Image (cartoon, coloured by chain):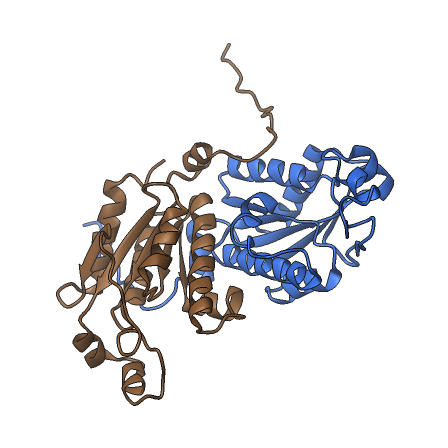
Chain colours: A blue, B brown
Amino acid sequence: MAQQKSTNITWHEGSVSRPERQQLLNQKGVTVWMTGLSASGKSTIACILEQMLLHKKKHAYRLDGDNIRHGLNKNLGFSAEDRAENIRRIGEVAKLFTDAGVITITSFISPYRKDRDAVRAGMKPGEFVEVYVKVSLEEAERRDPKGLYKKARAGEIKEFTGIDDPYEPPQQPEIVIDTEKTKPEAAAQQILAYLERHGCLKA
Amino acid sequence: MAQQKSTNITWHEGSVSRPERQQLLNQKGVTVWMTGLSASGKSTIACILEQMLLHKKKHAYRLDGDNIRHGLNKNLGFSAEDRAENIRRIGEVAKLFTDAGVITITSFISPYRKDRDAVRAGMKPGEFVEVYVKVSLEEAERRDPKGLYKKARAGEIKEFTGIDDPYEPPQQPEIVIDTEKTKPEAAAQQILAYLERHGCLKA
């Protein structure tokens, strides 16, 4: 007689463990943190990457200005203190999503090294994948899809990253994308290949 | 000759739509918001519900004091203003998880009606499922697993919900669980049945 599988699962006290969750979702939680100047192409690459992952039945989610600035961080301004708190909260939310097993893609300029490094420090090794979306200031100004650089040059926007506020490039990012040589789809493929190589797309 | 399926997917600009995401994940994002006195059993029920959902291959995640108070909300205290901001941020994070298609389970006392209603107001109809985890103060004090009521009665903890700070029960919660009559596992089953009935466990 065939052995009957038990249908009486015992529910344990406490949290579902990370390995158990990964097994059930067949993927590992990770944060893909894109950083770069305005108009570098972060959001475009993030959108394509999210779609590629979802089409592979991988659970991915994007955090960006649209869903953060008007919600969680709507009570923050642009002072140095508020900028730091902005990145801190985004980092904490990314950490929650990563803990939930989601492939989390953030696309924020995140210009200061110490803010990004603080997010990295809060995660486990391998969970924080920093992607430097590289573009020269000249090329970013040439693209300027929202006319922001023009306004910054005219003094209509103050403390604009690259113009009158510094951008500190990552020193040891996991991935560098030179957007003057790489198209967004190829960039997304490059990140996808990294995630695959590092075992994030399986339990 | 059999028609060949196209392997050239075109990646579109912008976000993955909610229906597209639901289709890919085979579930709908929803927030199960548990509210009730300390020692009512919120966390125990939340843990069991999360396990039951994950075993059904549904992506669920729990937000509670453990992963919120020491992270995202570690810069908040217990003043009236900070308590409101605490619930506001939790609501915003729950909204992000819900948007990501996750079945999000929150277990916080969340004693004030207006704070809970503000979270509900920020979500789409049907996305916010308020679960009143009901217990009498007498029974909560009898359980008192962490000795908190005892300390509150002794004046060692101030503004403790139920003792010297009010708890405002929901007026029209989607689900009421009387924990003096219902065991945690049955309570989790009750919530699961609700989610199933309301189509959350399929696309």
User: Residue at point 74% right, 61% down?
Assistant: A113
Q: Position of residue B23 (x, y in %)?
A: 41, 34
Q: Is residue A6 visible?
A: no
The correct choice, above or below, for A122 with respect to B141 in the image is above
Q: Quadrant of the C terminus of chain B?
A: top left
Q: Position of residue A149 (x, y in %)?
A: 79, 40
- The front one of B203 and A55 is B203
Q: Quadrant of residue B200?
A: top left
User: Residue at point 35% right, 44% down?
Assistant: B127
Q: Position of residue B164 (x, y in %)?
A: 29, 78
- The front one of A168 and A156 is A156
Residue lying farthest to the left in this orientation: B181
A197 relative to B108 in the view: left or right: right
B115 relative to A118 in the view: left or right: left
B6 relative to A14 in the view: left or right: right
The correct choice, above or below, for B142 with respect to A18 in the image is below
- The front one of B159 and B189 is B159
- The front one of B46 and A144 is A144
Q: Position of residue B183 (x, y in %)?
A: 18, 65
Residue lying farthest to the top in this orientation: B1
